[in-house]
Every structure is written in C-alpha cells, then in structure tokens.
Image (tube, grey):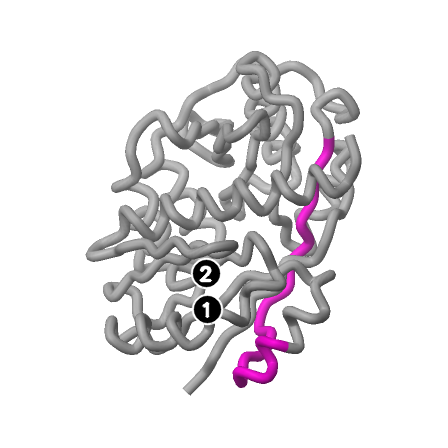
C-alpha cells in the first residue's frame, strides 16, 4: 500500500478520535467543516489537545482560522490549536500569517498489518476508565484528567487492552477501527512496570484483534520514545503531526 493512502487513513482516524474525545467531554461539542473537524470543550479551557481542530485537507486549514478563533473565544477557551500535516508547507505559511505557531510535533506512523513483526496474542480487554487511569499514572497526572476524558465515551467504539502485573493493570492501549484501519492511541505503562515488554504485549493484543476484524492497516501518533517501539514492530514514519496554536 502506498504511503499516501496510509497518511489519509492516519488523518481520518485521528479526526474521528478528536470528534469522539471532544464530543463526549463535559459540555463538549464538535464542529465539522470542509476539510476540517474540531472539538470545543469549555470545561478544559487550557487544553489545546481537547480544544483542537484536525486539518484533514491541510491546504484548507487557513480558511477556518478566524471562525475557530471566534468559536473558542465564545466558549472562553484560552488555548486551542490545529493539527496539521508537517509536509504541508503552504498550509503552514497560511497558519503563520494568522499568528499561529507550532508548539508540538509528533511522528505519525503506519503500516499494513501484513508487514508488521508481531506475534498473535489473546486480547485482554480494558474499560476506558482503566485505560485513562493507567495513562494518568504513566504521565504523572495527579488530577486524573485522562480517566475523566475517556470514561464518558460510548462503549464499543474504542477497544481497550491491558497487560497486568500483580493482578493489576500495568500497561494499556486503545484501538479505533475505521475504514479498515486500526488507529492505536493511549499506549502507556505505569513507571514501576516499564522495560518488561508490556507495551509490546498490549500492541500485539490490539493488532491481533484488528486482523480478526478485517482491518488491513494500522496507524498511530507516536512520542519520540514510542517511535522506537513502533519501529521495532514494523511501523514506519509517514509524516510529522504538528499542533499549531494561537496564543493570546
């Protein structure tokens, strides 16, 4: 499969996840425009990940900046952003002209399921609250923000997986099946259980079930550390996913 198709699946799945997260957060709502979707979450006014747009068609991103600025201002959101494919130079120039700057850049990765180097693994399901709680422990969020974000989402849309240590969840992942793609997100391991291969284990669970449900590809947004793990499984970098913010 060519990389253009994989990139399209990456951004389509990422946009769908954004709509799920924003649409089910407290007082959250969503916005859909030609080539762009966005979520607006007044209860998280300083979160540019919940209050973010995804530019599915990057060259059209600049068309929507002023409407987004107005909508977020009306919701009293202080920080918001637009996710943009780092390969889109004209779109980047347009956002810069609207006083937006890149604050985060993460590798977007993908692969066909046939080319991955993974073993079959029996899925061990995890509810969304558990996935959020393990992520909070992994990233030191004392306020439980990710558990609160994930817990309200509808059951069955996102599939959660876990690996356990001492009969407690120690590593987790989520998968969103969309248009034959398994979009992986929220992969995390609690600090005391790291370096045991647990992240690989939950990835194998997610990818095993993806194959069984007819998916043909898998995509994800990685951290710099996670990129090494996913590369070892057979994922390859497709682009750099940039978050552009307009700051006060």
Q: In the rendered structure, which segment of residues is drawn in magenta?
A: 94-111
Task: Tell me the number on the disc at residue 53.
Answer: 2
Residue sitting at 61 percent across and 48 percent down?
A: 221
Residue sitting at 43 percent across and 67 percent down?
A: 48
Crowding at dot 1, Cα within 10 Å, few <14 / some 14-19 / many 20+, comes out as some
Task: Tell me the number on the disc at residue 42.
Answer: none
As for residue 48 lying within the magenta part, the answer is: no
- Asked where in the image residue 109 lies, by quadrant, the reply is top right
At numbered mark 2, what does the secondary structure look like: helix, strand or loop?
strand
Q: Are marks 1 and 2 in contact (CB under 8 Å)?
A: yes
* 28 to 122, vertically: above or below: below
Residue sitting at 54 percent across and 28 percent down?
A: 179
Q: Position of residue 198 (x, y in %)?
A: 59, 32
Where, quadrant-wise, is the N terminus in this rendering?
top right
Q: Main secondary structure of the magenta part?
A: strand
Residue sitting at 48 percent across and 56 percent down?
A: 36
Give the mark nearest the N terminus, 1 or 2.
2
Q: Position of residue 57 (x, y in %)?
A: 58, 55
- From where the camera sits, is residue 161 visible? yes
Task: Tell me the number on the disc at residue 64.
Answer: 1
Q: Position of residue 53 (x, y in %)?
A: 46, 60
At numbered mark 1, what does the secondary structure look like: helix, strand or loop?
helix
As for residue 105 lying within the magenta part, the answer is: yes
> In the image, 247: left or right of 11?
left
* 122 to 25, vertically: above or below: above
């Amino acid at each position: 499969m060519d990389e253009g198709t994989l990139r399209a699946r990456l951004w389509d799945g990422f946009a769908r996840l954004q709509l799920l997260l924003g649409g089910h957060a407290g007082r959250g709502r969503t916005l859909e425009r030609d080539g762009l979707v966005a979520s607006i979450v007044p209860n998280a006014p300083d979160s540019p990940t919940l209050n973010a747009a995804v530019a599915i068609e990057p060259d059209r991103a600049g068309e929507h900046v002023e409407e987004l600025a107005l909508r977020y201002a009306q919701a009293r959101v202080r920080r918001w952003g637009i996710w943009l494919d780092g390969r889109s130079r004209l779109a980047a120039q347009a956002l810069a002209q609207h006083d937006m700057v890149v604050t985060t850049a993460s590798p977007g990765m993908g692969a066909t399921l046939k080319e991955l180097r993974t073993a079959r693994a029996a899925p061990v399901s995890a509810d969304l609250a558990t996935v959020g709680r393990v992520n909070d422990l992994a990233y030191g969020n004392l306020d439980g923000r990710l558990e609160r974000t994930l817990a309200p989402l509808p059951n069955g849309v996102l599939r959660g997986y876990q690996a356990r240590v001492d009969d407690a969840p120690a590593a987790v992942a989520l998968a969103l099946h969309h248009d034959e793609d398994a979009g992986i997100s929220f992969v995390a391991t609690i600090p005391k259980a790291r370096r045991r291969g647990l992240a690989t284990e939950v990835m194998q669970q997610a990818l095993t079930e993806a194959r069984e449900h007819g998916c043909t590809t898998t995509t994800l947004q990685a951290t710099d550390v996670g990129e090494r793990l996913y590369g070892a499984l057979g994922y390859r970098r497709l682009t750099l996913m940039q978050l552009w913010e307009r700051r006060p």
